[in-house]
Amino acid sequence: MAKISTDPKKIEEILSRGVAEVIEKDHLRSALLSGRKLRVKLGIDPTSPNIHLGRTVVLRKLRAFQDLGHQIIFIIGDFTGIIGDTSDKESERPMLSEKDIKVNMKDYFKQAFKILNPKKTETYHNSKWLSKIGFLELARIANLFGLHEFESREVIARRMKEGKRVSYLELMYPLFQGYDSVKVRADVELGGTDQRFNLLTGRHIQPLYKQRPQDILMTELLEGTDGRKMSSSYGNVINITDEANDMFGKVMALDDRLMEHYFVLGTNLSTVDIADVLRQSPKDAKMRLAREITALYHGTREAEQAEAEFSNVFSRGGKPADIPVISLGAPSMALVDLLIATKLAPSKSEARRLIEQGAVRVNDFVKKNNYLVDIYSGKDTLIQVGPRKFVKISQ
């Protein structure tokens, strides 16, 4: 049986680094110092196919518990994912289909195991028990709560005040998440601050099943590329599945004010090392940040190659070494249509916006109108959108 580490310094770092709130902190600290093996739970709904850096914050915290020797439990919410958690949403989230969830979660364990040790991780899909729960059981759980408790949630209260629809299904979501804690007999549950109500629900349900209420550790939320909370719904994510060059570039494009938070939540550097790095110039500090994050998910060699590529393209005005090459059937095409055809823009409205902003270059010339591009004019056509996206159209 593996020995549980009770190193006070490591325990204090778990309880403080990137942590917004712990319930009950003194009890959890004592439990960690006792040497007793704790069951530490984290559930993630596969509402998109990729795990982004925002979700790695709590996954990395789960790994910290694992490194101390505790039993970690990682749950893919294939049942709860269909319903959708609206804890931080201003409107009701449409239900996803079982097919969508199945597609989204295809590589979830594989992605999570970039952070967790698979040999020491207990894994589940929560449909295993939630798809079998009966009305009587659900009624017993629901009877623990009053409508006023759900109404007291800030987002729910605001939506109701504005006359927006709040479905019964939304009210039931926390019950399902809480029941997960019962089924895995969680001693501790991890989550972001946006999960506070759901996490507390688990504490409230467990005594019904003669279990001690779980302790809760809530991590801070990581900002996305636009400064808002990182979320797939906002499209402001850095996915751990992003190619090394793309990941490096996205980190380099972050606002300088986010660097310290990214170092604390997204890297393994000590607080002392972080302070030293942040004394450097913003450019050098951000290069270090991008290298550290990219290395975590792609390895040191690829991170160094991505850094060299970034320096070539952005610092020296060069071009990437691996520009995608495609062929198109038409001899000419309107620039808006060309951006759609090459997948450099997701829609015509976005393509027009990029053109108007001067973000589109054709053969190194900025194009600010939807002109007709002569694709096959005797040489390859290079299309560039922003600083990082390139496509070469070959004859």
Image (cartoon, grey):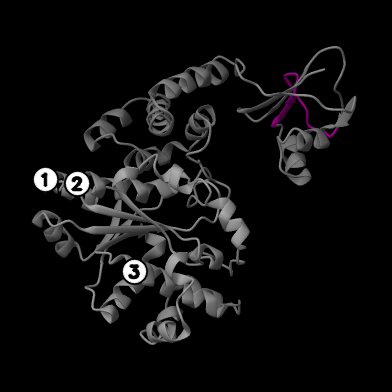
Residue 14 in the figure: left or right of residue 296: left
**If the image is split into quadrants, where does the C terminus sit?**
top right
Which mark is drawn over residue 183? 3
Q: Is residue 323 in the magenta section?
A: no
Dot 3 falls on a residue whose secondary structure is helix
For the point 51% across and 67% down, the residue is: 86
Which mark is drawn over residue 7? 1
For the point 55% across and 48% down, the residue is: 49
Query: Given contact means CB atoms under 8 Å apart, are the residues at marks 1 and 2 in contact?
Result: yes
Report the mark closest to the observer, 3 or 1. 3
Region in magenta:
359-371
Q: Earlier in the sequence, mark 3 or mark 1?
A: 1
Judge by depth and name the residue closer to the eye, 253 or 244.
244
Dot 2 falls on a residue whose secondary structure is loop
How far apart marks 1 and 2 lie (CA) works out to 8 Å
Which mark is drawn over residue 68? 2
Question: What is the count of numbered marks?
Answer: 3
Q: Earlier in the sequence, mark 1 or mark 2?
A: 1
